[in-house]
């Protein structure tokens, strides 16, 4: 028998792995990454990775789709977690949207060419 | 050419930023791409016209506050602008660069003594003149203005809000607006013609700043010229191979100029562009996907910001070393050392046929 509640956080645990398993020093863990990927022709995909847990990705995706008039899906990735995928280059729009919703701009990283 | 419309927004935005940036007096002064003597005067004139234009103390305060706000923003934009200048041969537009403070530090060891000496001399003479003047004006105005002293004091306080109280004189009341205007109109300031010499008022910050830049450039005129050509990188040469591949021909040359391993640069480029590729026999990089020169240039610029320039002194003279799987940048000119982010590809969406992807 174990009590799930109690093993949530042990303040006296050995903090050997502060950074988590795959995070080096200066990791990009808490950034929101907006990437772009080329498809065939002049088509591109925009991916949004690293959305904070407190936001509901599904609802955000819904808002994105409505706002940017594009389609998109939610993809579960082993490393990246939930990733929002949108059709077309929506990087700047996503960034503006997130900033307007109160996410600090410093945490948003736009990648791509 | 097909992707052109995609990348316009960011470019436009950067241009806007630049416009805003040119308002900054420091930035205007520190523009090294323009020829030395004429432009110093022009820019100082402009910078002071902006700063010293306000006649009332309130406006002056406001201008100062605004100036204070602009400076950190300029610092943030500095690296981007810096990099813009690195591709100097590519962009014909006017470049703003924050190299002057850097170079001042860099040159400080060599040329600091003459500058400091000159400055001290001038300061000394200024002080003397000032004292004499002050005595004279004190005598002259003491009787006349004795009755209006109280009001004058009040006005003085308003005029020079940050001035030292003991330096404020009654005589200044009448002269201050004129002096400020003269300071704004003074195109080239010789030593000893500073506007505050003619009156007993305190020198204001913009005046001192102008004086500093004037003396800095007078003492080492090479400052402007050397900064411009200091760090340029050849524009990437791109060619299309077939329909879906792009050849980046001079990648090794660019890497050599940045003093970086080609592997590191290539890894970063692939991660950023979300693609793959290979290096062919003659050292050229073959990138999958269609890319234009300006896109690759943009990626390279961000690489330089992140992995080449020193964050402390903005110098591109840095070394990238790897210790325990962590990359460190150590600056050759200022000696600072910091870790940099590992290159991460991040999430890659499924593109193309799944069946092809599964098999390899």
Image (tube, grey):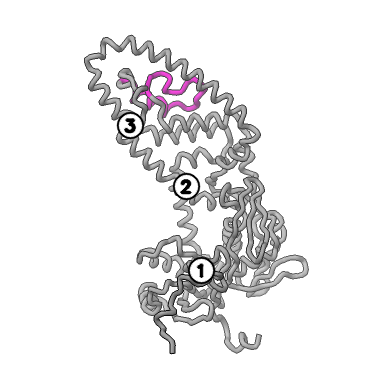
Secondary element under disc 1, as helix, strand or loop, is loop
The answer for how far apart the CA atoms under marks 1 and 3 are is 47 Å
Q: Is residue B297 visible to us here?
A: no
- Start and end of the magenta stretch? B174-201
Residue B100: x and y in percent read: 56, 40
Q: Chain of mark 3?
A: B
Point 39% across, 67% down: residue: A98
The answer for how far apart the CA atoms under marks 3 and 2 are is 26 Å
Mark 1 nearby-residue class (10 Å; few <14, some 14–19, many ≥20): some
Residue B148: x and y in percent read: 23, 17
Q: Disc 1 marks which residue?
A: A29
Which of the pair A63/B73 is nearer the observer?
B73
Pick the quarter of the image with the C terminus of chain A: bottom right
- Labels 3 and 2 touching (C-beta < 8 A): no
The answer for how far apart the CA atoms under marks 1 and 2 are is 28 Å
Q: Is residue A102 visible to us here?
A: yes
Secondary element under disc 3, as helix, strand or loop, is loop
Q: Is residue B150 above or below residue B83?
A: above
Residue B217: x and y in percent read: 57, 32
Mark 3 and mark 2 on one chain: yes
Q: Chain of mark 1?
A: A
Q: Disc 3 marks which residue?
A: B161
Q: Quadrant of residue B150?
A: top left
Which of the pair A34/B155 is nearer the observer?
B155
Please report whichever mark, 3 or 2, sits nearer to the chain's N-terminal start.
2
Q: Is residue B103 above or below residue B283?
A: above
Residue A72: x and y in percent read: 44, 79
Q: Disc 2 marks which residue?
A: B74
Query: Is residue B184 inside the magenta stretch?
Result: yes
Mark 1 or mark 2, which is nearer to you? 1
Secondary element under disc 2, as helix, strand or loop, is helix
């Amino acid at each position: 028998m174990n009590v799930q509640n109690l093993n949530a956080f042990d303040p006296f645990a050995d903090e050997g792995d502060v950074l988590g398993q795959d995070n080096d020093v200066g990791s990009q863990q808490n950034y929101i990454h907006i990437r772009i990927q080329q498809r065939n022709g002049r088509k591109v995909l925009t991916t949004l990775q690293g959305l904070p847990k407190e936001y509901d990705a599904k609802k955000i995706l819904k808002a994105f789709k409505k706002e940017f008039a594009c389609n998109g899906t939610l993809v579960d990735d082993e490393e990246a977690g939930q990733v929002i995928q949108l059709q077309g280059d929506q990087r700047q729009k996503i960034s503006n949207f997130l900033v307007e919703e109160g996410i600090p701009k410093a945490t948003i990283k736009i990648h791509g060419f | 050419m097909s992707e052109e419309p995609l990348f316009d927004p960011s470019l436009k935005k950067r241009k806007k930023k630049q416009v805003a940036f040119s308002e900054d007096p420091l930035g205007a002064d520190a523009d090294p791409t323009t020829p030395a003597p004429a432009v110093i005067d022009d820019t100082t004139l402009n910078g002071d016209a902006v700063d010293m234009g306000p006649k009332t103390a309130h406006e002056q305060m406001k201008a100062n506050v605004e100036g204070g706000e602009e400076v950190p923003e300029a610092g943030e934009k500095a690296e981007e602008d810096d990099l813009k200048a690195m591709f100097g041969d590519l962009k014909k537009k006017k470049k703003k660069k924050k190299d002057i403070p850097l170079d001042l530090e860099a040159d400080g060891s060599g040329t600091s003594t003459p500058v400091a000496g000159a400055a001290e001399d001038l300061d000394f003479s200024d002080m003397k003149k000032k004292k004499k003047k002050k005595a004279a004006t004190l005598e002259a105005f003491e009787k006349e203005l004795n009755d209006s002293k109280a009001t004058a004091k009040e006005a003085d306080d308003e005029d020079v809000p940050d001035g030292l109280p003991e330096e404020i004189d009654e005589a200044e009341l009448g002269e201050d607006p004129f002096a400020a205007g003269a300071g704004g109109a003074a195109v080239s300031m010789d030593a000893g013609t500073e506007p505050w010499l003619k009156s007993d008022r305190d020198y204001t910050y913009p005046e001192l700043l102008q004086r500093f830049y004037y003396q800095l450039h007078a003492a080492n005129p090479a400052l402007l010229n050397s900064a411009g050509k200091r760090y340029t990188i050849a524009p990437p040469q791109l060619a299309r191979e077939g329909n879906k591949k792009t050849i980046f021909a001079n990648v090794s040359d660019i890497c050599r100029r940045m003093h970086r391993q080609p592997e590191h640069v290539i890894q970063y480029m692939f991660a950023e562009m979300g693609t793959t590729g290979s290096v062919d026999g003659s050292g050229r990089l073959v990138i999958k996907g269609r890319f234009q020169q300006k896109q690759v240039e943009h990626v390279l610029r961000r690489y330089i910001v992140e992995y080449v320039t020193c964050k402390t002194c903005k110098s591109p003279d840095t070394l990238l070393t790897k210790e325990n799987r962590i990359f460190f940048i150590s600056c050759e000119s200022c000696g600072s050392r910091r870790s940099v982010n590992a290159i991460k590809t991040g999430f890659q969406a499924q593109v193309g046929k799944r069946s092809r992807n599964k098999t390899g």
